[in-house]
């Protein structure tokens, strides 16, 4: 269901109609982090506090050290002190790190003395990841730049409007090569920080999947249609590098079109193969 557009946005008066700036997003992220921290979602990994025992270490032990070893950056932790100074890369690195270590509290013991609270003893990582992803994507949905946290814990660019469903649809095949290569191409294309070369390579990878399926395509398409399918990749600087290639086009726009064209084609072709094989 589409969210309600309020007065200033409807009239074009809202200065943040296209999304909030990074500083505001960092502030929103900090608030959800603090809520989850208070509710025990990071106790297992980051540790907790007891009025009697003081700081109780989590399984990460020295969190600063573990972040440095994992991300190779300093001055990211404690999140409470650093979040408002994060760059975009910092924010996304920390989100991905926390996603690997969040866990929902399940059972524990109430420590009433001094209002200490729950000492959680058992945790569920999957439930923690689901909630953190939901909360993070709720925040990122307000960002002026379009990103989301995937179920695999990677920050990816959000799908272009109208193409959301294609990333949610399962590929109708049990061929691991097709599934793995297609999914890898999608991640390469959507990954935060992907370059123009990354996106061109992602298009090429999708074409390679179709090349792999070509023997079966010959049973479904005319020779002319088959040739047309590969014409763009073979003659517009995607698969080959020679003076015959046509490359005087806006790569940012057309590589996006090629990516969605070939990804959609893979889905269609696999469904046609599935139907053909059931006859």
Image: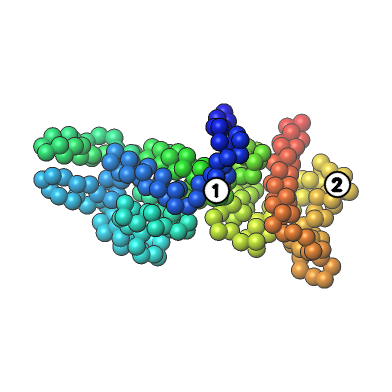
Residue 122: mark: none
Q: Is residue 278 left or right of residue 77?
A: right
Q: Mark 2 or mark 1: which is in front?
A: 1
Where is residue 261? Give x, y as percent: 73, 47
Element under label 2? Answer: helix
**Residue found 33% across the figure and 53% down from its top:** 79
Residue 225: mark: 2
C-alpha gap between disc 2 and disc 1: 41 Å
Is residue 204 at least partly visible in the picture? Answer: no
Q: Which residue is mark 1?
A: 144
Where is residue 253? Give x, y as percent: 72, 54
**Residue found 55% across the figure and 48% down from its top:** 144
Where is residue 271? Give x, y as percent: 71, 37
Q: Residue furthest bottom?
A: 243
Element under label 1? Answer: loop
Q: Is residue 224 left or right of residue 193?
A: right
Point out the tag, 2 or 1, that comes first from the N-terminus: 1
Is residue 201 shown above or below 100? Answer: below
Locate residue 72: give its quadrant.
bottom left
Quadrant that contains the N terminus: top right
Is residue 57 at least partly visible in the picture? Answer: yes
**Residue found 76% across the figure and 68% down from its top:** 241
Is residue 196 shown above or below 27? Answer: below
Q: Is residue 151 left or right of residue 128?
A: right
């Amino acid at each position: 269901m589409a969210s309600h557009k309020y007065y200033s946005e409807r009239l074009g008066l809202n200065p943040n109609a296209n999304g909030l700036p990074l500083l505001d997003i960092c502030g929103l992220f900090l608030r959800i982090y603090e809520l989850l921290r208070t509710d025990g979602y990071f106790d297992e990994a980051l540790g907790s506090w007891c009025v009697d025992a003081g700081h109780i270490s989590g399984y990460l032990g020295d969190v600063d050290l573990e972040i440095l070893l994992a991300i190779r950056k300093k001055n990211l932790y404690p999140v409470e002190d650093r979040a408002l100074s994060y760059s975009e890369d910092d924010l996304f690195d920390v989100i991905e790190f926390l996603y690997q270590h969040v866990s929902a509290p399940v059972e524990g013991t109430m420590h009433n003395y001094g209002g200490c609270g729950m000492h959680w003893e058992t945790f569920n990582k999957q439930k923690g990841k689901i909630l953190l992803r939901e909360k993070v994507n709720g925040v990122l949905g307000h960002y002026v730049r379009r990103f989301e946290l995937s179920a695999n814990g990677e920050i990816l660019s959000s799908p272009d409007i109208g193409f959301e469903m294609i990333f949610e649809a399962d590929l109708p095949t049990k061929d691991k090569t097709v599934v793995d290569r297609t999914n890898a191409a999608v991640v390469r294309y959507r990954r935060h920080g992907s370059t123009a070369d990354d996106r061109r390579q992602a298009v090429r990878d999708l074409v390679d999947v179709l090349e792999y399926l070509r023997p079966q395509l010959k049973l479904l398409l005319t020779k002319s249609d088959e040739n047309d399918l590969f014409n763009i990749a073979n003659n517009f600087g995607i698969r080959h590098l020679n003076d015959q290639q046509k490359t005087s086009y806006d790569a940012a726009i057309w590589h996006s079109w090629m990516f969605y064209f070939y990804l959609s084609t893979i889905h269609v072709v696999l469904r046609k193969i599935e139907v053909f094989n059931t006859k």
